[in-house]
Amino acid sequence: MPKTGKNDHARKDELPTTLQRSEQKAQDTFAKTYDSAMESYDNDSSRAARTAFASLKHSYEKVGDHWEPKEERGPSDARAEEGADSTSPTAGGVDANASKEHLYERAQELGVKGRSKMSKDELVKALQKANEAATRRARED
């Protein structure tokens, strides 16, 4: 089923919950990319969803239970840089290519404990964990 409605905006009830809690532009980016990918990939919904998330992650980063605009557009992690055939792990929406300072600020927003002593890689992993926990809590509400 298409993710974009007649008004050319995302059908909110068709989106992942993290996108339902995000701004309209993030929703539309995902939905339009998903619909285009469904046409290109012969209705392969799994591939279309991966493509839509890859597109979203170039402009947005996951913060807690929703997506927020990134400071700089571009790939968010090694997997995004390498493309569809990459075997690198994903950072789950965390902008792993952002500065350590930016990651620290995000960790501070999300209340990550021990953040001041973490390396950049540790901050990315801690943010992934905090995002997953926030998403679980939001789904329970």
Image (cartoon, rainbow, N blue to C red):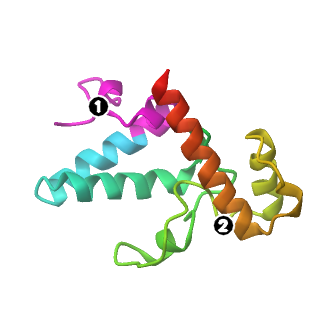
Please tell me whether residue 2 belongs to the stretch shown in magenta.
yes
Magenta stretch in the rendered image: 1-28
Label 2 Cα neighbours within 10 Å, binned few <14 / some 14-19 / many ≥20: some
The residue pinned by badge 2 equals 97
Picture coordinates of residue 127 (x, y %)?
Answer: 66, 52
Looking at the image, residue 92 lies above or below residue 108: below
Q: Is residue 65 visible?
A: no
Looking at the image, residue 53 lies above or below residue 137: below
Tag count: 2
Q: Secondary structure at mark 2?
A: loop
Looking at the image, residue 9 lies above or below residue 79: above
The residue pinned by badge 1 equals 14
Q: Nearest the camera: 131 or 57?
A: 131
Q: Quadrant of the N terminus?
A: top left
Query: In the figure, residue 114 lies in which quadrant?
Result: bottom right
Please tell me whether residue 80 belongs to the stretch shown in magenta.
no
Residue at image position (83%, 55%) is: 115
Labels 1 and 2: the sequence-earlier one: 1
